[in-house]
Image (cartoon, coloured by chain):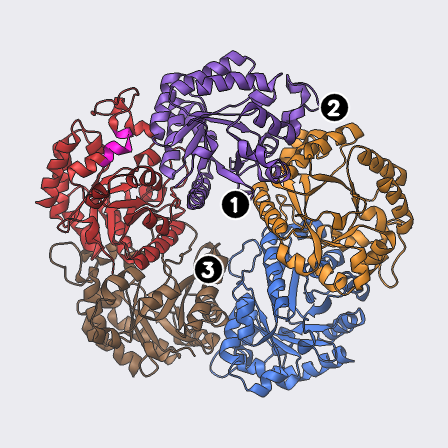
Chain colours: A blue, B orange, C purple, D brown, E red
Amino acid sequence: MINLQKILKDGKALFLAYDHGMEHGAAEFSAKSSEASREGGTGYIKAVDPSYILDIAHKGGYTAVILHKGVAEKYYLSWGADERKCVPLIIKLNGKTSIPDVEPYSPLVCSVEEAIELGASAVGYTIYLGSEKESTMLWEFGEVVREAHRAGIPAIGWIYPRGKWVKERYGSDTNPKVVAYAARVGLELGADIVKIKYTGDRKSFAEAVAAAGRTKVVLSGGEKTEKEEEFLQTLKDVMAAGAIGVAVGRNVWKSRDPLKITEKIKKTVFS
Amino acid sequence: MINLQKILKDGKALFLAYDHGMEHGAAEFSAKSSEASREGGTGYIKAVDPSYILDIAHKGGYTAVILHKGVAEKYYLSWGADERKCVPLIIKLNGKTSIPDVEPYSPLVCSVEEAIELGASAVGYTIYLGSEKESTMLWEFGEVVREAHRAGIPAIGWIYPRGKWVKERYGSDTNPKVVAYAARVGLELGADIVKIKYTGDRKSFAEAVAAAGRTKVVLSGGEKTEKEEEFLQTLKDVMAAGAIGVAVGRNVWKSRDPLKITEKIKKTVFS
Amino acid sequence: MINLQKILKDGKALFLAYDHGMEHGAAEFSAKSSEASREGGTGYIKAVDPSYILDIAHKGGYTAVILHKGVAEKYYLSWGADERKCVPLIIKLNGKTSIPDVEPYSPLVCSVEEAIELGASAVGYTIYLGSEKESTMLWEFGEVVREAHRAGIPAIGWIYPRGKWVKERYGSDTNPKVVAYAARVGLELGADIVKIKYTGDRKSFAEAVAAAGRTKVVLSGGEKTEKEEEFLQTLKDVMAAGAIGVAVGRNVWKSRDPLKITEKIKKTVFS
Amino acid sequence: MINLQKILKDGKALFLAYDHGMEHGAAEFSAKSSEASREGGTGYIKAVDPSYILDIAHKGGYTAVILHKGVAEKYYLSWGADERKCVPLIIKLNGKTSIPDVEPYSPLVCSVEEAIELGASAVGYTIYLGSEKESTMLWEFGEVVREAHRAGIPAIGWIYPRGKWVKERYGSDTNPKVVAYAARVGLELGADIVKIKYTGDRKSFAEAVAAAGRTKVVLSGGEKTEKEEEFLQTLKDVMAAGAIGVAVGRNVWKSRDPLKITEKIKKTVFS
Amino acid sequence: MINLQKILKDGKALFLAYDHGMEHGAAEFSAKSSEASREGGTGYIKAVDPSYILDIAHKGGYTAVILHKGVAEKYYLSWGADERKCVPLIIKLNGKTSIPDVEPYSPLVCSVEEAIELGASAVGYTIYLGSEKESTMLWEFGEVVREAHRAGIPAIGWIYPRGKWVKERYGSDTNPKVVAYAARVGLELGADIVKIKYTGDRKSFAEAVAAAGRTKVVLSGGEKTEKEEEFLQTLKDVMAAGAIGVAVGRNVWKSRDPLKITEKIKKTVFS
């Protein structure tokens, strides 16, 4: 049996995502592009330090934290046992940088077996639907699901339509049709949770949730929004549409007060 | 020995296919493009829900249901034991989306071993003959046949000519010559059943059946037809031509009354 | 030790080849393009049915029959034990269709181990020398030879120069220089028998035989010739040049009387 | 536990790098392009001889020497046991030549297991971020980290942004933003040490060090500088910025007096 | 320990190379392009027959013979035990034909394990430095070295710069700089012997030998030269430059009197 409850609380998901150093670079932590206060000595905000993020995850009551294997090994593993029990680990298995402008593909940098050894309670993998390398990612995710399910842990699909065909055929990667397609692909491939983008309105997001069937849906938090209220309203709509929660990152640790915004998010998710 | 009888009844095949969420997207379940009634709350018809499909399969007396591994694991496995006994499972091993406009290739997303663990009585794999990636699919299907036959279960080939060479050399993918070629490739590679398209007339379909030899032939149901009678006449011709049945999907669950059309199909197949 | 005698008689080879349904399509069995009589009910000649071919192989006294794994499993395996003893099996391990116009490459669709389980006394593999994918085929044939020789059975190389470089550098794929090159590649890679095309005259074919050294040479029968006498004369020249026999297909089962032409071929090969 | 101390002294790193014969060719040892004195009989400096390098490593008190597997096997392994104890071995696992002008990619030429058999206390692997083959290197480094950590030895990442996208998007491969990105990728992937280039000033290098978190940073020594003082000043800045040391090569063995410059470097690193 | 002495005599190498049937075709044995006398019955010289070559190797006192696996299995293995003891076997592990004009790459057609089973005392592998497929060959040679050294036998690298980048950057593949680079790559990758081309003069060849360090150097014999004395002078220069011998083929078996030229070569190598 696949144990999904370990990374949920009352069936709801509040994931703190922190794989941006790989996906976007250290510039993501630049004090210039953030409301958050600087860290002493560098031009970065405190969030450049994984320990600070773990602290937020713990104090904020997140139901899980999402890390790449290197950060997991060097920070999560040496965290206190109590903290680790409180905040389960989700390992992001694949990753890429934003440096080359190539066909979207994110290779595996960690195996499911390795993730489990690092204490992961679930694993995540990104599929870029519509990429010319889509077939490679479908195959790899098939393997990830198989290995995760044999080990009894959930497989989470970050399923993002991307690339020229998405633009040509759907106009945007948040077109409700293509987001619902993504959600459905997650179900067909055996994902236990899919992380998808907001479609723009509650009704169309509910269709994506319906398309996902018994696969749970979490909202992808996305870039730091300027208007906090707007973000919270989106989250409210998404929960009303049947999602089980959100994976949030920049909107928390780039904000002036991460724990304060966390409280507001929790209120929305767990209400 | 390969046990083909498990997915047949009186030697005939009535398969309910349901892999369209992967191949075409959730838009396939849109109420707008369907005669079927809406599901409460979304713009989809009831068929968006795999449970509804399983229900049709059971009530309709289908000899097997065709699913991707995710749907099998989350719905079929938790179905009642009696229902599962009545409606055996065929797992579709490979899949792709329709988002990118790339050379036709559908990667493996499930292994034969995994399919068997999910309770499959047979496995299916799609080959796009004529694709620039044809050689990869021929090789993968070779592996699928080997593993399936070692486990004693049938391997079904969805064998579809596709791509620019088919158009250039045969005009259409339903040209009798290329359909018969597809059927023959199934035999040569060790498929126990081939699923092929209708050639347009009984006589030429009989040639495809002859080309397949001891490999059984089922008709690919295809898109929802507007004229039900036409579809049933095709099925009648195909059975008369020596096919053992049909894999039907959209013509059932997109129709106003799935069980009613099922009865008509059964009458044709089992007569 | 590699047992070559099982597929020979008095050191001579009379192979009935029947992989054309894969390589050329069912159209190869069309009654329109053949002298042979139609089969009842379809536009095909009787040769569309593998049972008919096995019957010819047995009655005609062929020293082996060449089949793809699917035909072997569904027909050869269920043949009588006596018949199988009389007519040993050669499995063609790789194959492709003629539908796409791509760089010549024929992927493995059957492993050596699988072939042996199906009762094969030898295995065959096609290399298209000069293809941009030549390196893949050289590597795969290297593996085939290794596995076959470990199991003690012969590896036969269908070694055909093909593609734009052959045309540009040799003018034709039957240029004696490139045919001798093909024969030599067979020897260097460890083939026990090479199947090559006719060079056009006895003297140059003898050079190909010399280039092959201890690797035996059989003639590739090729397309159905209109003039039977010409074909038999070619065979006579080839035997005089040192070949050990022929792999014949269409010139037998597309002829008006397969057993009659077989007798003439046997007379030439075994004289 | 990963033993990092074996290749450090007082927590500092002074690595003598010697993989240039592979990466740049024997021309790197040309007496013409070097201040160092010639070796008898050829146009090379003494550094062409690996024994000479090992001698410098030992006399100079380097905390480790970096070699490709061939040099390790033929020189390091036959060195005295005392010397090997004094100067631990780091094997560079991947390499390429500078001959073809192709997309940057450096394949594995030695496995982690093999490196350990050759006595390695750590392994190194180069990733060219921004290459069209970035995904292959991310995957391979993921494997290297996994195998190294299972064996308890450190994995060092040479992480260099390179290629057209780096130029287009960052202007230069020493742009502080892209160097910090490289350092961060090392942390995310599980590197224990990253070897990166100088960003041009102490403050921005400190940001790269901050981005690397618990992954240690060593400076890549780079080409032979004409002004020794400038190189030492860079090293001073880098150490002040939080680096643990330097991997130096050409600036040592291409200098007039390798041990003298070594002393100056040591003073900077260990002060 | 790697046993290099088995294929040497008094530390010197006199290898008879015979892989030309694969690399250049049977045309290499054409009587028209050779001083050697014809073989009875064909347009070839006697050298088309591997038995004749083995005879030269034995009578000529060669320290080893270089063969592809097919020739080794069909001729060397059935040679007398005494002869095999006198003339050890080096198996060439990779090969390609000269038919397609593609980016230089020579795939593995024999594994190290297989070579050892065929009685090989050493194995050889060709790397084309500068090819767009260089990385594949570096990786494969890395594997070959590992497997050979685990079995205790030497790995020989045929290291040839080739392709458009070599021409563009070095002018010619015998430019001393690129030949020395090739020799050095052999050392770095763990080759026990490198086979390289002549640089044109003794001094520059000595630099290639210095670059190779403890990796031994043998001259690649190359095409049949018209002037025997010139070839012998090259060999004299090469030996004086520190090489341990030569791998010769066409200059022996294409000459009027193979044993006579062998005597002259031996005098030069062993003097």
Tell me where residue B208 appears, x and y as whole percent.
72, 32
Query: In the shown orientation, is residue D201 left or right of residue D86?
Result: right
Element assignment for label 1: loop
Compared to C256, does D104 lie above or below?
below
Residue type highlighted by circle 3: Met
Question: How far apart, in angstroms, are the residues tagged by discs 3 and 1?
Answer: 32 Å
The residue nearer to you, when weighing B239 against E181, is B239
Residue at numbered disc 1:
C111
Residue at numbered disc 3:
D137
Mark 2 Cα within 10 Å, few/some/many (few <14, many 20+)? Answer: few
Element assignment for label 2: loop
Tell me where residue D187 appears, x and y as whole percent.
47, 72
* Residue E46 seen in the figure: yes
Q: Is residue B60 magenta?
A: no
Residue at numbered disc 2:
C40
Write down the region rendered in magenta.
Answer: E47-54
Q: Is residue E52 magenta?
A: yes
